[in-house]
Amino acid sequence: GAAAGVGGGLVQAGGSLRLSCAASGFTFDRYAIGWFRQAPGKEREGVSVIDPKDGRAYYEDFVKGRATISSDNAKNTVYLQMNNLKPEDTGVYYCAAGTSYPGGMGYWGKGTLVTVSS
């Protein structure tokens, strides 16, 4: 199985981005799909996760109110819409699939770079 995350780029503070994660090779709605990020010089951290079966979502405190995670099960794709981006949101964003968040993610995408300029 594999998960490919795309949609990163350079954006000014206050701007928006939508990241997409297309999953393949595994039954999409059997797993939680999460987004993680790794800022320069920092450890990777969870951002948000969704259960595609029922749409339940969880957000880390630092993105609550600024991000929306959603899934299109027909396309095996999960989206992360991020608004009011801040320079501290800069990092490589990864999508991952697994049985539990954040520690049980077994399928990882390659990552997409998000750079937020001040």
Image: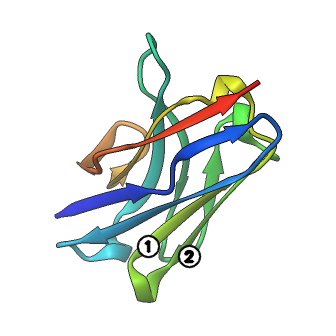
Q: In the image shown, does 102 or 21 lie closer to the viewer?
A: 21
Q: How is the image coloured?
A: rainbow
Report the quarter where the C terminus lies: top right
* 3 relative to 72 in the view: left or right: left
Which of label 2 and label 1 is nearer to you? 1
**Which amino acid type corresponds to the residue marked 1 in the rendered image?**
Thr
Which element type, helix, strand or loop, lies under badge 2?
loop
Residue denoted by label 2: 54
The residue under label 1 is: 77
Q: CA distance from mark 2 to mark 1?
A: 14 Å
* Residue 94 x/y as whole percent: 40, 44
Quadrant assignment, res 21:
bottom left
Secondary structure state at the residue bearing disc 1: strand
Is residue 10 found left or right of 35 in the rendered image? right
Q: Nearer the viewer, residue 86 or 12?
A: 12
> Looking at the image, which residue is at 33% across and 71% down?
30
Amino acid type for the residue under numbered disc 2: Asp
Please report the residue visible at 77 percent of the width from the left and 49 percent of the height from the top: 83
Disc 1 packing (10 Å; few <14; some 14–19; many ≥20): many
Check residue 104 in the rendering and tell me which mark sits there, or answer none.
none
